[in-house]
Image (cartoon, rainbow, N blue to C red):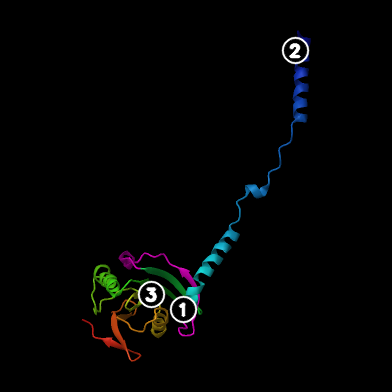
Amino acid sequence: MKCNNVLLVFILGLLSLNTACTEKPQAVKNLDEIRPKSESKQRIKQYTEAKDTLLPYLKEYNQDSVLLEIQRISLLEQNHFINRFQPLKKSAFLLQQSDSTENIEHFAWEFKDSVATKNAFYNWLDIEKSSKILSSKSLSKLYFVALITEKHIDFFYSNKKMDVPKLMRYVKFNRNTDIYKYIIIQKRNSKALWYQFADEKLNLIPSK
């Protein structure tokens, strides 16, 4: 009996050794398949596409007749109150000037006619800002410039004083008009000042 047990153990040992020797080695895993793939190329591609898409807008700010000297332009999330009044077009850009000392937020809307423009602007004043036409109530914590033409509303915000004549030239040449229905210029946390534009001059309108 003992001999049979020894023989059985010996046979099982040979079988185990044979299996271990004949088993195929596992394929070596490719580390490139394991490690997370770099997204750098994809990000560069996306940045390039965005840059190319915004290039025409960048040229509008830097054309010879405007000279805002914007170095970089990027999209802003568009959450403005005026969006709810169904503009034909809307845009929101963050503008970085060439000296990198001033960033400007530019929100713009185009409407089908002067009635739609006034409706959006008046509602923004009344509902969003609890203000009214020619009121000196502050409309922003930032430096603020509003340029309203017959079919366009352009709002500019910045932490620092902006070059208003250049902003007006931007509107003039890109909206094809130099007739402004309303012009508001406000320093940070200050009163809103309303102006008329005539004979190439800004004329302050007494506030109500």
Type of amino acid at the residue the image marks with label 1: Tyr
Q: Is residue 65 magenta?
A: yes
The residue that appears at 78% across and 14% down in the rendered structure is 7
How many numbered tags mark residues here? 3
Q: Is residue 207 magenta?
A: no
Which percent across, then down, holds residue 24? Answer: 74, 33
Element marked by disc 3: strand
Q: Which quadrant of the structure image shows residue 109?
A: bottom left
Front residue of 61 and 27: 61
The residue that appears at 49% across and 82% down in the rendered structure is 63
Which percent across, then down, holds residue 96? Answer: 48, 75
Q: Quadrant of the N terminus?
A: top right
Name the outermost residue toward the bottom: 199
The residue that appears at 50% across and 74% down in the rendered structure is 56
Label 3 packing within 10 angstroms: few (<14), some (14-19), many (20+): many
22 sits to left or right of 160 = right
Which numbered tag is attached to residue 157?
3
Whole-number angstrom distance, CA of label 2 to CA of label 3: 93 Å
Whole-number angstrom distance, CA of label 1 to CA of label 2: 95 Å
Label 1 packing within 10 angstroms: few (<14), some (14-19), many (20+): many
Residue 167 seen in the figure: yes
Type of amino acid at the residue the image marks with label 3: Tyr
Name the outermost residue toward the top: 1
Q: What range is drawn magenta here? A: 62-87
Label 2 packing within 10 angstroms: few (<14), some (14-19), many (20+): few
Provide the residue designation for mark 1. Answer: 61
Element marked by disc 1: helix
Which percent across, then down, holds residue 159? Answer: 40, 76
Provide the residue designation for mark 2. Answer: 5
The residue that appears at 40% across and 73% down in the rendered structure is 106
Front residue of 10 and 150: 150
